[in-house]
Image (cartoon, rainbow, N blue to C red):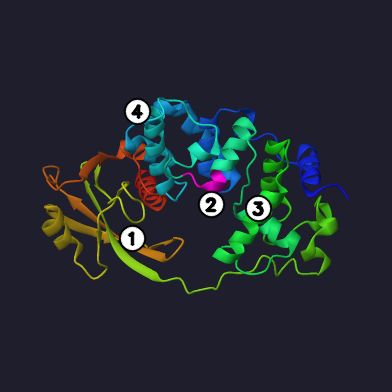
Amino acid sequence: MPAFSQRIIAWQREHGRHGLPWQRTRDPYRLWVAEIMLQQTQVATVVPYYLRFLEAFPDVRALARAAEDEVLALWSGLGYYRRARHLHAAAREVAGRLRGAFPRDAATLETLPGIGRSTAAAIAAFSSGERGAILDGNVRRVLARHRGVEGDPQSAAVSAKLWALARRLVPRAHVAAYTQGMMDLGATLCTRARPRCGECPVAGDCVARREDRVDELPGRRATRERPRREVQILWIERAGETLLVRRPSNGVWGRMWSLPEASVADDPVAVAREHLGIRATLVGRLEPIEHAFTHYALTMHPSRLAASSSQRSERAETAWIAHTDLDGAALPAPIRRLLAATRGEARA
């Protein structure tokens, strides 16, 4: 039987994915943007974001020159916004410390914000053919099943086993095809649910298939009940404008613009007056919005308020944004959907 890597390469060339926009380049900058976007996000979701992002920032210097709000606005809806902030910080580091020359080797790539071991190896493989192992979630699943590696694949002990295995299996030639093949195999055939083992190029010596343990491998992480948090959000309007506040750098939606928050039990009119310096009247309360984060579930209770056109907020990190400009603002996806849906109802 041909070596594991040979079968992966042959399968990728005939059956793998070949039409994705980032597969048409060896430019490490463009490959980097794709790899960061693809972290924890499906390909179909990423493609339009990737194309819009590169239209706005065609090279690393353009991204480095951009304002943070521009970057976050184009990222809005992709989630995990820390990736966007790391992307921006890394671009500025490349433009400065590396004088605009985006690195192609994994060792230098790993020194940049937001680029870990696996991502660095993938960028280096696709841009220069450098030999290195990747171990994203899809690859962990393929290797755990094929070699029968038990236990939580995210635990330190199991992760060390999988990294050692991943390094041994990397071929000495055609590294880019092998790397893409491992990604494609995990994404399209060796999926978490209903894997298509009959089409898999390495099914012939797969431990999980031979022992009828495909559903057991990789091992599962111990499940914990996701905590739930509830918050009131204040939608304050005046003369065709909405009041937004800048979120802090730490925590979810860091440095993005959003609606002011308050405790669910708080009087929204009092919060607007005492914390934002705005006198407003309550128009009504809207249906709650549910949003799931990795570590907790959030229920947002929107209260809609009206302020007179003369009202100003002198508080730092606040801004009145015209309704016509909200589409271009760096807003979290659920807040954007709330504002867009309710404005649409008003127009109708």
Gap between marks 3 and 2, in whole Å? 13 Å
Please report contact status of discs 4 and 3: CB closer than 8 Å, yes or no.
Answer: no
Does any portion of residue 187 appear in the rendered image? no
Please report contact status of discs 4 and 1: CB closer than 8 Å, yes or no.
Answer: no
Q: Which mark is residue 286?
A: 1
Query: Which residue lies under the disc numbered 3?
Result: 139
Gap between marks 2 and 4, in whole Å? 27 Å
What type is the residue that disc 4 sits on? Answer: Arg
- Helix, strand or loop at mark 2: loop
Q: Residue at x 82, y 52 (%)?
A: 199
- Helix, strand or loop at mark 1: loop
Magenta span: chief secondary structure: helix
**Stretch in magenta:** 115-119
Residue 100 percent coordinates (x, y):
42, 25
Q: Is residue 67 positioned above or below 300 on the image? A: above
Dot 4 or dot 1: first in sequence order is 4
Of discs 3 and 2, which sits in the foreground?
3
Does any portion of residue 178 appear in the rendered image? yes
Q: Residue at x 86, y 47 (%)?
A: 2
Q: Which mark is residue 227?
A: none
What type is the residue that disc 3 sits on? Answer: Val
